[in-house]
Image (cartoon, grey):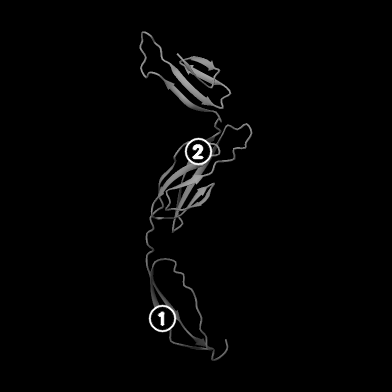
Amino acid sequence: VKPNLLADGKATFYPSAPGEYEISLIAINGDRRSSPSTLRLKVLEPPVVPDPVIRVFKAEQSSVPLGSAATLVYDLSDSVTEAYLEPVGPVDPRARSIQANSPSADRPGATSTSVTYTLIARNIAGKETRKSLTVKFVKTAKSSIIKFEADKAEVDPLTGMVTLTWQVSNAARIELEFGSSKDVLNEPSGQRS
């Protein structure tokens, strides 16, 4: 050490636990020592951070047409400061829902695929909780039923007759099922009694 050294500096103190600490600084030159300068510090108990809570995590529909987005609904406690949805990415902990995109609809031969979503919620202390759910994405037919009606909601047991009316679009085949019987219909619209 050089004589007559003027020095100033900084040091960071990391207490290991709450409590009272005494820290002294002494200047030394050869065999001579200054009077100690002492600081007394009180380290407080850290505040209790509430656990993160996922109050709600659900899909609006458990089965979604392939190519459509799934709406995932969630509700997190106020203690959550960070939220992440696997496999989507970060989500806003104060939002109430997110649209999760469908997997690719270009998979040959696949009629459905399932995706498991995991919501991870963390508090400021780094503690986390997680919940998972699975959504099934289903390849839907391009055909649709435009109309299917019966002329009566109640059928007379003596005549046992009701007239059914239907109309479909883009169907390659139309089947009418009743009980254990099945009838193939040849017209995209029509009636049957």
Residue farthest to the bottom? 4
Q: Amino acid at mark 2?
A: Val
Along the line of sight, the residue nearer the viewer: 131 or 61:
61
Q: Residue at x 51, y 42 (%)?
A: 69
The kind of secondary structure element at disc 2 is strand
Residue farthest to the right? 108
Q: Position of residue 132 (x, y in %)?
A: 48, 43
Residue on which disc 1 sits: 38
Alpha-carbon span between mark 1 and mark 2 = 64 Å
Residue on which disc 2 sits: 135
Rendered position, 122 above or below 17: above
The kind of secondary structure element at disc 1 is strand
Rendered position, 26 above or below 100: below
Relative horizontal placement of residue 144, taking residue 94 as reference (left or right): right
Q: Residue at x 54, y 16 (%)?
A: 184
Q: Position of residue 48 (x, y in %)?
A: 37, 59
Q: Which of labels 1 and 2 is toward the front?
A: 2
Quadrant in which the N terminus appears = bottom right
Q: Position of residue 106 (x, y in %)?
A: 62, 37
- Packing grade of label 2 (10 A; few <14, some 14-19, many >=20) is many
Along the line of sight, the residue nearer the viewer: 134 or 59:
59
Q: Position of residue 52 (x, y in %)?
A: 41, 52
Rendered position, 33 above or below 44: below
Q: Amino acid at mark 1?
A: Thr
Q: Earlier in the sequence, mark 1 or mark 2?
A: 1
Along the line of sight, the residue nearer the viewer: 139 or 174:
174
Q: Residue at x 50, y 86 (%)?
A: 28
